[in-house]
Amino acid sequence: QLQLQESGPGLVKPSETLSLTCTVSGGSISSSSYYWGWIRQPPGKGLEWIGSIYYSGSTYYNPSLKSRVTISVDTSKNQFSLKLSSVTAADTAVYYCARGRTYYYEVLRINYFDYWGQGTLVTVSS
Amino acid sequence: DIQMTQSPSSLSASVGDRVTITCRASQSISSYLNWYQQKPGKAPKLLIYAASSLQSGVPSRFSGSGSGTDFTLTISSLQPEDFATYYCQQSYSTPTITFGQGTRLEIK
């Protein structure tokens, strides 16, 4: 059974860089069948996609966060990571990592996240 | 950007009720629509992908329909464990994706 686990500091100071790691167990992060993503959820609010990284190494980010986000992968450790720079209180949220996959139906290629980590709360405060 | 609007934002229902949640896209997204269920303090769980395909292990009382701009998630007979928040998510503009604002389903 695939499992994802987020780890990292629960408290980050304003203007600093938030760094989280997602450790994948029960499957290989190197599989070309999947991609990997980060999603966040401010307290009491909805879900916001942060970005994704594909087998090819290509990364894609939410345009609203693009200038501050970096996602990378470490295949030797079966992990992928998120860095979000210049954080403010607005970045306080539960951060989830997730596995993405593609469903092929006729001419459609439909992507979705089928496995998620439990989430980790990151608070931005001095 | 493709905006996803869910309605209602919240609703109250009783065990055994049939419930329908609607998601509307700001432009046509074909069948590039997924539904997730989230319980308090838990990660979202995939219910439906490609508008109407039931994820493995999800009870058959959940169903999805729609194409283009209008989609629905239906729970045919509410069970106690179904009280949660539901989100739609479009992947038409993959790799950029967006979620609806959520629909909170509460016990009447």
Image (cartoon, coloured by chain):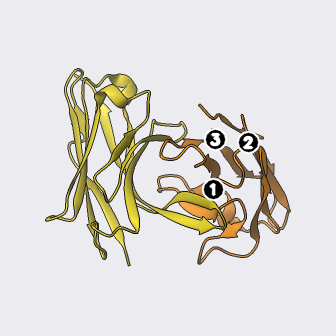
Chain colours: A yellow, B orange
The three-letter amino acid code for the residue at tag 3 is Gly
> At label 2, which amino acid type do we have?
Ser
The answer to whether residue A106 is above or below residue A67 is: below
Indicate the position of residue B30 as horizontal and vertical percent values: 72, 51
Real-space Cα separation, disc 2 to disc 1, in angstroms: 14 Å
Circle 1 — which element?
strand
Left or right: A112 as drawn, with respect to A29: right
- Residue position for label 1: B34
Up-down: is B56 above or below B92? Answer: below
Residue furthest out toward the left: A76
Which residue, given by chain and number where applicable, does mark 3 sit on?
B100
Badge 2 marks a residue whose secondary structure is loop
Q: Position of residue B3 (x, y in %)?
A: 65, 34
Q: Is residue B108 visible?
A: no
Of badges 2 and 1, the one in the foreground is: 2
Q: Nearer the viewer, mark 2 or mark 3?
A: 2
Q: Is residue A121 visible?
A: yes
Task: State the residue position of label 2.
Answer: B28
